[in-house]
Image: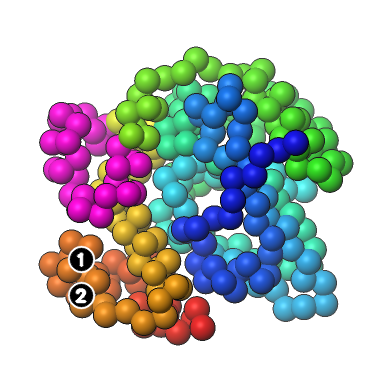
């Protein structure tokens, strides 16, 4: 039986609305694959006879493999927001790799995947249509995960210690709001700026500066969803912005709406 990880807490925009439209689940990977994979995830929806829904997320710095009938792909890190139109009835099954965790499978700079999608044949020459068919013939998520893990174990690389370092840094950025600059990271982990930037471009696909900003904007969106009332000037200073205008610009560039507009859209 697949072990559930719990519902997403950050990254899904308008989460309360999204949870009414679609069912989201996450599952742990096996011990053998956990080093590379953060979790498996599923989204299913039934909008038969209803209006389509534009689902939007602010993705983490992770590569995903997404299985969907007739449309399975590898997704690089999306630097903007990710949008997809849910309509009729459907489901997808995804593999979320840990930041840097896809590199040993791919063996090419992950920045080449950023903001792009690729066929799964880029990873393996197996019959991927057959794999997709096998996955969607199963209703039980545990059975689907067994199929996925059998496939991945055939191409399983050796653990790469750089993945451990990358995830230690990224977890610290996510949890420690006082980290507001790349220079702080270089001091905390005794790593030169150029080496840190090169490591992130090759293994993660985005810069450490982008990661800092993404987690802060995710946090703002989550707080707005829960609190419904925000003092934006105070919040901007709290997140390390030198003025409210800079914060609003970053927020709008990322989400496509001003903070006030987004707050209104969550109601």
Q: Quadrant of residue 133?
A: top right
Q: Nearer the viewer, residue 16 or 119?
A: 16
Is 94 on the left or on the right of 192, as rendered? right
Q: Position of residue 124 (x, y in %)?
A: 64, 25
Q: Is any atom of residue 202 visible in this view?
A: no
Q: Is residue 121 visible?
A: yes
Q: Residue at x 86, y 41 (%)?
A: 137
- Confirm whether the magenta stretch covers residue 196: yes
Residue 37 belongs to magenta span: no
For residue 216, what is the image quadrant? bottom left
| Residue beneath the point at 59% across and 74% down | 17
Place of residue 205 in the rendered image (x, y in percent of width and height, measured from the top left): 39, 39
At mark 2, the secondary structure is helix
Distance between the alpha carbons at the discs numbered 2 and 1: 6 Å
- Taking 102 as reference, is 47 left or right? right
36 relative position to 131: left or right: left
Q: Residue at x 83, y 35 (%)?
A: 134
Residue beneath disc 2 = 234
Q: Secondary structure at mark 1?
A: helix
How would you classify the magenta stretch by its main secondary structure?
helix
Instruction: Report the residue at 50% width, 67% height from top.
Output: 13
Which residues are drawn in magenta? 169-198
- In the displayed structure, does residue 167 sit left or right of residue 105? left
The spot of residue 157 in percent (x, y) is 53, 17
Q: Nearer the viewer, residue 112 or 242?
A: 242
Circles 2 and 1: CB atoms closer than 8 Å = yes
Where is residue 199 drawn, in percent x and y?
30, 30
Circle 2 residues within 10 Å: few <14, some 14–19, many ≥20? few
Residue 24 falls in image quadrant? bottom right
Specify the label residue 238 is tagged with. 1
Q: Is residue 86 above or below residue 27?
A: below
Quadrant of the image containing the N terminus: top right
């Amino acid at each position: 039986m697949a072990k559930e990880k719990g519902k997403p807490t950050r990254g899904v925009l308008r989460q309360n609305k999204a949870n009414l439209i679609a069912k989201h689940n996450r599952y742990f990977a096996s011990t053998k694959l956990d080093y590379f994979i953060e979790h498996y995830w599923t989204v299913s929806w039934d909008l038969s006879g209803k209006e389509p829904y534009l689902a939007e997320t602010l993705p983490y710095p992770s590569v995903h493999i997404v299985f969907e009938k007739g449309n399975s792909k590898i997704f690089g890190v999306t630097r903007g927001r990710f949008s997809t139109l849910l309509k009729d009835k459907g489901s997808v099954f995804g593999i979320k790799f840990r930041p840097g965790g896809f590199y040993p499978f791919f063996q090419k700079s992950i920045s080449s995947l950023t903001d792009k999608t690729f066929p799964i044949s880029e990873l393996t020459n197996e019959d991927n249509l057959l794999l997709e068919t096998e996955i969607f013939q199963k209703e039980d998520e545990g059975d689907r995960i067994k199929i996925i893990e059998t496939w991945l174990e055939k191409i399983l690389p050796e653990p790469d210690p750089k993945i451990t370092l990358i995830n230690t840094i990224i977890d610290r950025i996510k949890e420690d709001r006082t980290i507001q600059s790349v220079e702080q990271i270089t001091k905390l982990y005794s790593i030169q700026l150029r080496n840190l930037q090169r490591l992130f471009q090759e293994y993660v696909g985005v810069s450490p500066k982008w990661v800092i900003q993404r987690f802060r904007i995710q946090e703002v969106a989550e707080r707005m969803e829960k609190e419904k009332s925000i003092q934006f000037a105070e919040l901007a200073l709290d997140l390390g912005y030198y003025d409210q205008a800079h914060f609003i610009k970053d927020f709008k560039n990322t989400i496509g709406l001003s903070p006030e507009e987004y707050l209104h859209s969550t109601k």
